[in-house]
Image: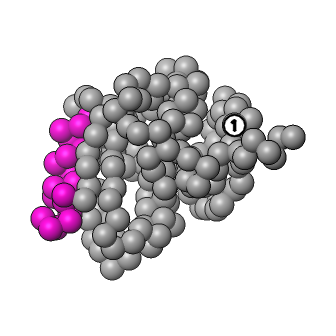
Amino acid sequence: MALVPYEETRGMGLQKFHQPLATFSFANHTIQIRQDWRQLGVAAVVWDAAKETQVRCFPCSRPGAHVTITDRKVALEFLKSNVQANLPPHIQPKAVVKELTWGHNLGNFSPGEFDLILGADIIYLEETFTDLLQTLEHLSSNHSVILLACRIRYERDNNFLAMLEKRFTVSKAHYDPEKDVHIYKAQKRNPRDDL
């Protein structure tokens, strides 16, 4: 279990997570993400790795692209409200909000369905690593690109990267020393590479 310490009276530290709105500007767009720490805890705040992923990857998205945004069932309504608040009505049909709990109900997604998979701050609970790897393998094809933004806080985070490297070709795509956020690029290994 990962714990995030927070005291409302201690400086600005993690107080930003208790703000009802987080505002971001990138690629000439401003978005406001509603946050609710008290209702959903870590699932309802915007982490630095998510911001870094958007800054680095948003320009990669193409007009007309179809996007699937996932989270666990408990956070879906919250996620849907943020999508509706930030996407123009004519684009909303191209952004599907869908339940995804790693390692479960993967049949709701076609194998290799996604060209680009973005994950931000999802490497933190060791007990989920096997399910996360299984999910990434299911969702990606040999042509898919997976970008994982994270902080490497503990040895277990390095252990996940080692597990990932056994199944995918992994490289560091970016590092922001100010925020201590890494972005790793992963692609399925070609079985011929292992011969």
Q: Tell me the colour scheme of the image.
A: one colour
In magenta segment, residue 92: yes
Local secondary structure at mark 1: helix
Task: Using residue 159 as the reference point, say whether residue 141 is left or right of it.
Answer: left
Task: Using residue 103 as the reference point, say whether residue 126 is left or right of it.
Answer: right
Q: Is residue 21 in view?
A: no
The residue segment tinted magenta is 75-93
Q: Residue furthest bottom?
A: 28
Q: Residue furthest right?
A: 195
Q: Can you give x and y, in whole percent of width and height, for residue 107 in the image?
A: 38, 29
Identify the image quadrant of residue 25: bottom left
Total label count? 1
Nearer to me, 54 or 110? 110
How busy is the neighbourhood of tag 1: few (under 14 within 10 Å), some, or many (20 plus)? some
Nearer to me, 162 or 192? 192
Name which residue type carries label 1: Arg
Q: Can you give x and y, in whole percent of width and height, for residue 138 in the image?
A: 51, 36
Nearer to me, 12 or 151? 151
Q: Is residue 107 in view?
A: yes
Identify the residue at image location x=58%, y=32%. Answer: 133
Q: Can you give x and y, in whole percent of width and height, for residue 184 in the image?
A: 63, 52
Task: Using residue 8 as the reference point, say whether residue 127 is left or right of it.
Answer: right
In magenta segment, residue 24: no
Residue to which mark 1 is pinned: 167
Magenta: main secondary structure:
helix
Instruction: Classify 25 as above or below 151.
Output: below
Q: Can you give x and y, in whole percent of width and height, for residue 142 in the image?
A: 61, 49
Identify the residue at image location x=35%, y=65%. Answer: 65
Instruction: Classify 137 as above or below 47.
Output: above
The quarter of the rendered structure image containing the C terminus is top right
Identify the residue at image location x=30%, y=34%. Answer: 99
Identify the residue at image location x=49%, y=55%. Answer: 115
